[in-house]
Image (cartoon, rainbow, N blue to C red):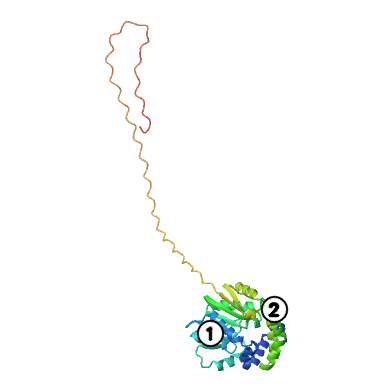
Amino acid sequence: MSKADLSKQPAQVAAMFDQVSTRYDRTNAVLSVGNAALWRVATTRAVDPRPGETILDVAAGTGTSSASLARNGASVVAADFSEGMIEVGRQRQAGNPFVRFVQADAMALPFDDDSFDAVTISFGLRNIVDPKKALAEFYRVVKPGGRVVVCEFSQPPLAPIRAGYSAYLKYGMPVLARVASSNPAAYEYLMESIEAWPDQRTLAGWLREAGFERVAFRNLTAGIVALHRGFKPERAAVPEPEAAPVAKPKTPAKPKAAPAKQKAAPAKPKAAPAKPKAAPAKPASTGAAGSEPSASTVPSEGE
C-alpha cells in the first residue's frame, strides 16, 4: 500500500506499526547500518534535556529515544499513536521512573497549552497525515522560550550521495527488511515516505509558519538525516494599565466680585469767587468787552 493510501487511513498506519513493534529497534539498527544510535545521540544533545524539565517525545515508539532524553533526570512523556509500540515500550521501560507512556495523536495532543520545556520527534513527522498541524500542536504545548527538535530523513544536498541513497532505498533496504523485520511489506511504505519527504529548507519553513523563531538545521550523515530546531518566542511583558487619576471634585468657582461702583464724579468745583467789583468804567473804548470764564471742564471717566 502506498503512502498516499495510508495517509488517508491513519488507523492502518497504526496497525502497521503495531505489527513491527517487537522488532522495531533491531530493524532500525540494521536498516540504518548502525547510524540510528548516532542519530539518537545527536538528537538528545540538540534537545539538551536538563534535570527537572518536562519533555514530550512524540512518536516515541518503544521509548528508546525517551530513555536517552531522561538520562539526566528530565521527566519524559513518551507519546505514540500505536498501541502496540506503547505496550512494548512500557515493558522495556518499566523500571524507569522518568518515562511515562501516553497514547496520543500528534495532530490533537491531549495536553494543556504551555506544558513542556521541550518537544521532540524522531523519524515520525513524515508518518503524520498533516505534518503542519502537528507542528502547530507542538507550538501550542511547549512553554514560551521552550524548544522543538525534529530529527527526520531528508534530502542529501550532493547529487552523487542523493543518487546512491536512492539506489539503497530501492534495492538495498527491501533485502535488509526481509531479513530483519517481522513485516517487510511495511518497509515499502518507509521507502516511499522517505522519497516523498521535502528537503531541509522546506521543513524549516514549516517550523517558521508554525510560529517558531531562531529556526536552524544541520545535516547528519551527509544529509540523509537532518536535525531541525526552533524556539517558541518568550511572551512580551504586558504593561499593567496605569490607574486613572482620581478626579478631585471641582470646587465651585467663587462668584466674581461685582465690579466696583464707579466713583462718583468729583463735585464740580465751586464757582470761582466773584471778582472784585469792576473798577470804574474806563472811558469807552473801541474794543469789545470780555465775557466771564465758564466753569471747569468735567474730568474724563476714571481720571
- Point out the frontmost of discs 1 and 2: 2
Quadrant in which the C terminus appears:
top left
Quadrant in which the N terminus appears:
bottom right
Tell me the residue at 62%/81% (across/down).
221
* For residue 15, above or below residue 118: below
Q: Is residue 224 left or right of residue 65?
A: right
x, y (%) of residue 125? 63, 81
Residue that lies at the very extreme toward the front in this rendered image: 160
Q: Quadrant of residue 37?
A: bottom right
Per the image, label 2 sits on a secondary structure element best described as helix
Q: Which mark is residue 160?
A: 2
Amino acid under disc 2: Pro
Lower position in the chain sequence, tag 1 or tag 2: 1
In this orientation, which residue lies closer to the viewer: 125 or 71? Answer: 71
Q: Which residue is mark 1?
A: 69
Disc 1 crowd, CA 10 A, few/some/many (<14, 14-19, 20+): many
Q: How many marks?
A: 2
In this orientation, which residue lies closer to the viewer: 121 or 41? Answer: 41
x, y (%) of residue 102? 56, 87
